[in-house]
Amino acid sequence: MRTIVVAVLGIAIGVLLARSWYVKPAAPDPIQVMVTQMRTHAVIEHERQVAIWYRACPEVPGVNPQIFIAWPARLSYQLELADVSLERDGARITVHTRGIVPVEPGVPTDFMDYLSSGSLFTFANEKDLINQEIRKSSPLARYLSAYFLLRDASLKTEFTREIDELIRHMAGALGVPVDAVDVVINQPEAKLPKLPGIALCEGSTASVNGYPFAKLQDQFTVPIRFEPGSGEPGAAVHGIASVYAPEPGRKPAPR
């Protein structure tokens, strides 16, 4: 009897082993494959090149000088895909992601340009005044990074387009028919940091890519609301900023 039981068990185990060896495993769920691949990509990045310029009139002993400041900045943003989720309804795929976040902007101060108009009655060191403005560049760039994230609708459009193309490429490789891709970016309400103080000249504004974003009011720097990409008349470029790497030993001409 024991021999019969051992023989039956041996046959059963042999059949199971043979089945596992010859039977092909079920095809993986294509949606799960997409999710895994998107998480492998980890992060989508986007950059904005901007130029900032303004006229500063710092309070100094004697006659206050006028200093024209111009510098470029690179505003950077990321969208992590670590917790992305996908839903499929026929040939329509819906993608859910976390929100876009700004990262530390790039401010190449080597490309900062300035023109200073002083006088014999300005009792202040010009180099110290310029260094004060250079130290304000990074806080200003962080403020603008947050502002563009809050106000620039095209920023979200750029990330949506990247995800849409990524899904369509994956679906094509997996043979999954896709007629539409809906991207839902769960963007939390962004809060603007405090606008750094700038010693703007009376009646002037600070501009980014031609959009005035700050002005002097009652001796305080106050923000100006603008809609990036709106084309509104008040946001038109009224001048050209000269932004370039200064040559060694070159002294800016008085303005």
Image: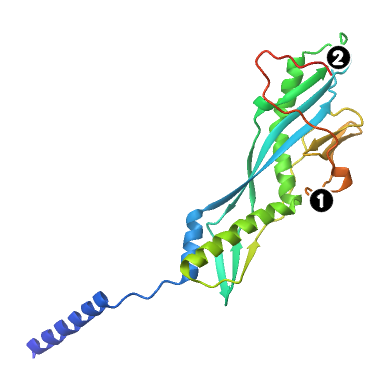
**Left or right placement of residue 188 versus residue 254 in this view:** left
Q: Mark 2 Cα within 10 Å, few/some/many (few <14, many 20+)?
A: few
Q: Measuring from the top left, give residue 12's x and y in whole percent.
A: 19, 84
Residue 84 in view, yes or no: no
Instruction: Tell me, for residue 61, which label it has, or none.
Output: 2
Residue at 63 percent across and 58 percent down: it is: 161
Instruction: Tell me, for residue 104, which label it has, or none.
Output: none
Q: Measuring from the top left, give residue 193's x and y in whole percent.
A: 74, 42
Count of numbered labels shown in the rendering? 2
Residue, disc 1: 230
Three-letter code, disc 2? Pro
Residue at 65 percent across and 15 percent down: it is: 248
Q: Earlier in the sequence, mark 1 or mark 2?
A: 2
The quarter of the picture where residue 3 lies is: bottom left
Foreground tag (1 vs 2): 1
**Left or right placement of residue 224 versus residue 136 in this view:** right
Which residue is at the far top? 120
Scheme of colours in the image: rainbow
Residue at mark 1 to residue at mark 2: CA–CA distance: 42 Å
Q: Measuring from the top left, give residue 99's x and y in whole percent.
A: 64, 55
**In the displayed structure, would residue 190 be above or below residue 12?**
above
The residue lying toward the viewer, choosing from 75 and 121, is 75
Q: Quadrant of the C terminus?
A: top right
**In the displayed structure, would residue 105 be above or below residue 180?**
above
Q: Secondary structure at mark 2?
A: loop
Q: Mark 1 Cα within 10 Å, few/some/many (few <14, many 20+)?
A: few
Three-letter code, disc 1? Ser
